[in-house]
Image: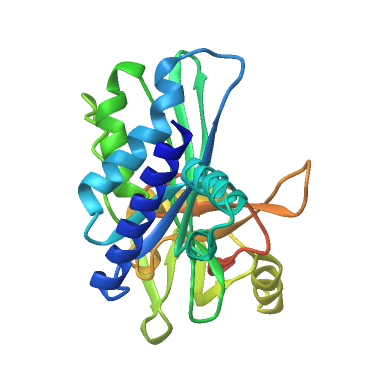
Amino acid sequence: MKQNKIELVLIFCIIFAFGILISGEKKKTILISKITTSSKTRSINLEVFQDKLKSKIIEKFSSEYRVLTEDDLELFITQAEEIQKHGKDASKILSQIADARDSDEYISGKLFLENGKFKVLLNNISNSKLDNSLFTKSVVDISFDESELEHFVNEISIKILYPKYKMNFDSSVTKKISFVKENLVKEESKTFQIGDLVWGEFEGVLKWDEANSICLGKGMRLPTPEEVRHLSLLKSRYMTEPCCVYWTSLVLKKDDDYAYYINVNDGFGNYYHKELDNRVRCVKRNLN
């Protein structure tokens, strides 16, 4: 039985390697880290969410991505050890495991029950092979009924790879929201004003401390989560281009190594380590 498992893994690795060769390395590799679930709740759907997500990504984007999970890598490592015990060369499998560890994108997060609904918090960290920098590519932060799992796994599989995708929430009620008119202050630098709040030009993709220092140096500050979320609802063209994840001024009280971001594509946010790179605009009040 064990021998059969080894043979199956070897076949899989050969197919995986062959796929790399014939694709000319055009495909990106995604590693889905373990998506944690609450130990306080019992649900079959909670346990199979990661497998469903993997299957849906493969189904939709297999021509663009190779998809692996931590469970896949653990199995490969176990089988590599078995091969080595029999005195055979496992270097090819180990090399492929190392390549998978150095994936182009990493999906991680957690799934739990909250107020009778599924709560999904996922992050996609992109690994730039040009300068070895990591940055937040996409974020998913939603709640839905357990009966809607299949629908939202489908939506999440797209959103987590393509931040600009507008998820279909299939809401029966849509509230109309009115906003203060957006006024352009300085066209060449793309600054703008909404109400009495002036938004500075796009500063680039920076770590939080660097972003905070730049804003303070200009006599401005990082915006609050509410201020960025307001622009998300407004769909301000100056925030969505470039898109999508912006730092805010909010720092986690329990651990000041983390600060809050908002994804202006959908208004959702979460805490991220300050050493990660996110987009930056500074703000100040117009006292005139």
Q: Foreground residue, 108 or 209? A: 108
The answer to whether residue 179 is visible is no
* Residue 207, image x, y percentages: 64, 68
Which of the colour schemes (rainbow, by chain, secondary structure, one colour) is used? Answer: rainbow
Q: Nearer the viewer, residue 70 or 50?
A: 70
Q: Is residue 243 above or below residue 163?
A: below
Number of disc labels: 0
Q: Residue at x 44, y 65 (%)?
A: 104
Could you tell me residue 79's position as x and y percent?
A: 52, 46
Q: Position of residue 143 (x, y in %)?
A: 41, 28
- The vertical placement of 59 against 285, above or below, is above
In the image, what residue occupies the spot 34% across and 59% down?
14
Quadrant of the drawing holding the C terminus = bottom right
Looking at the image, residue 227 sits to the left or right of residue 222; the answer is left
Residue 191 in view (yes/no): yes
Compared across the picture, whether 172 is left or right of 85 comes to left
Q: Residue furthest bottom?
A: 188
| Residue 114 picture location, percent across and down | 51, 19
Side of 180 relative to 119 (left or right): left
151 w.r.t. 235: above or below: above
Instruction: Look at the image and tell me in which quarter the N terminus lies.
Output: top left
